[in-house]
Image: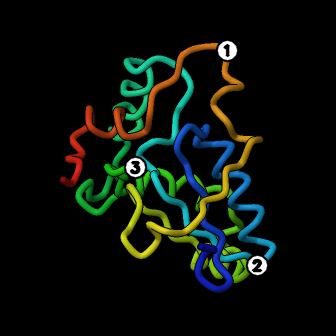
Amino acid sequence: MKAPEGFTVVDASGMIAGRLASLVAKRLLRGEEIVVVNAEKAVLSGRRKSRVKEVKEFWEVVGRANPARGPKHPHSPRSFLRDMVWGMLPRDKPRGREAFRRLKVYEGVPETLSDVSFEKLPEASAEKLRHGYVSLGEVCEELGWRKKA
């Protein structure tokens, strides 16, 4: 079965998260509506320890006036991937905000998309990596994300 009318469904499993995000951002700016599934299976290059350490250091950044007000940091793979794409769009312009509204990201595969054929982006494949990598789900689990059963 094909994707819902007008949507492109991209499978993030085994894809480098940053490269996937940049390719998705370009396509969103061209006007495509994109659904990304299996966000927790996207990968980050490098060792698990160093990746978790980087994220924890980033989380220590808080506002000076009232730290409770932000910035808010993502904890789930879905939020991580959405934020990566958001950072690659011109968010100060209406064009970028409209493009971001055309993006949907899911952890796993929702029942409504279970019989849809997924598109793989070979340019973002983790097979290109020479060194180790860790999945986005593993990093998020170590940072406190609880996988839904």
**Crowding near the residue tagged with mark 1, few <14, some 14–19, many ≥20 C-alpha atoms within 10 Å:** few
Q: Residue at x 70, y 40 (%)?
A: 124
**Crowding near the residue tagged with mark 3, few <14, some 14–19, many ≥20 C-alpha atoms within 10 Å:** many
Which kind of residue does numbered mark 2 sit on? Gly
- Marks 1/3 in contact by CB < 8 Å: the verdict is no
Residue that carries the numbered disc 2 in the rendered image: 31
Give the label on residue 60, or none. none
Where is residue 5 shown, x and y percent of the image?
Answer: 64, 86
Label 1: which secondary element:
loop
Position of 111 with respect to 26 (left or right) is left
Which kind of residue does numbered mark 1 sit on? Arg
**Crowding near the residue tagged with mark 2, few <14, some 14–19, many ≥20 C-alpha atoms within 10 Å:** few
| Vertical placement of residue 114 versus 5, above or below | above
Which kind of residue does numbered mark 3 sit on? Pro
Nearer the viewer's eye, disc 1 or disc 3?
1
Who comes first in sequence, dot 2 or dot 3? 2
Residue that carries the numbered disc 3 in the rendered image: 77
Label 3: which secondary element:
helix
The CA span between labels 2 and 3 is 24 Å
Q: Residue at x 49, y 58 (%)?
A: 37
Residue 129 lies in quadrant: top right
Residue that carries the numbered disc 1 in the rendered image: 130
Label 2: which secondary element:
loop
Position of 140 with respect to 17 (left or right) is left
Say which of 1 and 35 sits in front: 1
Q: Residue at x 56, y 26 (%)?
A: 45
Who comes first in sequence, dot 2 or dot 1? 2
- Marks 2/1 in contact by CB < 8 Å: the verdict is no
The CA span between labels 1 and 3 is 23 Å
Where is residue 104 shown, x and y percent of the image?
Answer: 51, 70
Toward the top, the furthest residue is 131
